Each structure stands twice: as C-alpha cells, then as structure tokens.
Image (cartoon, grey):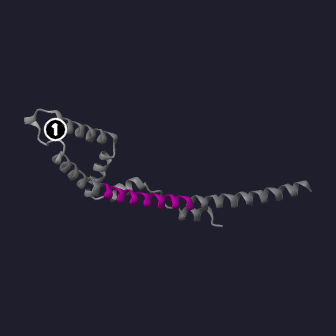
Amino acid sequence: MPSFEELKKLRKPIENINVKHKESLTRLERFAVLITDHIGTAGFFVIISIWTVVWIFWNTFGPREARFDPFPAFVLWIFVSNIIQIFLLPLIMVSQNLQNRYDELRNKAEFELNLKSEREIDHILFHLEEQRKTISEILEKHKK
C-alpha cells in the first residue's frame, strides 16, 4: 500500500474544466456558442413567432398597396425563413460538436477524480484496518 507521501505525489491538481474548455475555443466557435445560446431560448421562439404572425397578418389584411408578399404563397417569407435556417442549422451543429467536446473533457475529469478518490479510500481503509489490528493487539495484551 502506498504511503501518504506517495499518494500526495500521485495527486494531480484539480483543473477547472469550464475554464479549460472556454480557453480552447476559437473566435468562430465562441461566436457559434453565442448565437446558439440565444436562439435556443424561449425569447427567440417568441420573436420568430411574432415576426411570422405580423408578416402573415400584414400581407393578408394590410392595405393592398402596402402588401409586399402576397397571400396565399408568402414567397418572400418562405425565402427569408429558409435563409435564416440555412445560417442557423450549421451553427447549431457546430455548437453540438463543441458541447460533445466539453462533455468528453468533463467525463475525463470526473473519471480521474473517481480514480483518485478510490485510491485515497483504499488507503484510508488500509490504515483503518491496521489501526483495528493494533487496537485488537493492545486489548489482548491488557486482558492478560
């Protein structure tokens, strides 16, 4: 069983995986995370919903001369919506890849921490068993 000093030498300092991951991101990756953090919210959903309702309402019931995307096709609305999707889908995929990378770092750190804890628990149990044996020997000597 390794001594306490040997265990201390094996001990690595604990790393903050959150900081390590953020420092590893490039500018483009930080931009992708920023965008996807905002589009993955209820607020973004509400904005898109309101924009869609206003667009359809205006182009259906607004003054005829002011309608710019005629009912029932809404071709311009479909075009703009598709452009938004074309830009957002790759950003979402990039963000998912970054999240997977972060999860792998976290899993590795948790595994290392579990191994460290297991070694230290084994060491403590070994010493407790040694103490139990010593106490038992002392009690046996005092009984005589």
In this view, the residue farthest toward the left is: 65
* Residue at image point 54% right, 65% down: 10
Q: Quadrant of residue 101?
A: bottom left
Residue nearer the viewer, 50 or 27: 50
Residue nearer the viewer, 50 or 5: 50
User: Taking 120 as reference, is 129 left or right?
Assistant: right
Q: Main secondary structure of the magenta part?
A: helix
* Residue at image point 20% right, 35% down: 57
Q: The N terminus appears in which quarter of the rendering?
A: bottom right
* Residue at image point 30% right, 45% down: 38
* Residue at image point 23% right, 40% down: 52
User: Taking 40 as reference, is 14 left or right?
Assistant: right
Q: Quadrant of residue 22?
A: bottom left
Residue nearer the viewer, 80 or 10: 80
Q: Residues within 10 Å of mark 1 (few under 14, many from 20)?
A: many
Q: The C terminus appears in which quarter of the rendering?
A: bottom right
Range shown magenta: 92-115
Residue nearer the viewer, 123 or 51: 51
Q: Residue 93: within the magenta?
A: yes
Residue type, mark 1 in image? Asn
Q: Quadrant of residue 119?
A: bottom right
Q: Residue 105: within the magenta?
A: yes
Give the image location of residue 90, x and y in percent. 28, 58
Give the image location of residue 16, x and y in percent. 43, 54
User: Taking 64 as reference, is 86 left or right?
Assistant: right
Which residue matches tag 1? 59
User: Taking 141 as reference, is 89 left or right?
Assistant: left
Give the image location of residue 15, x and y in percent. 44, 57
In this view, the residue farthest toward the right is: 144
Q: Secondary structure at mark 1?
A: helix
Give the image location of residue 96, x and y in percent. 36, 57
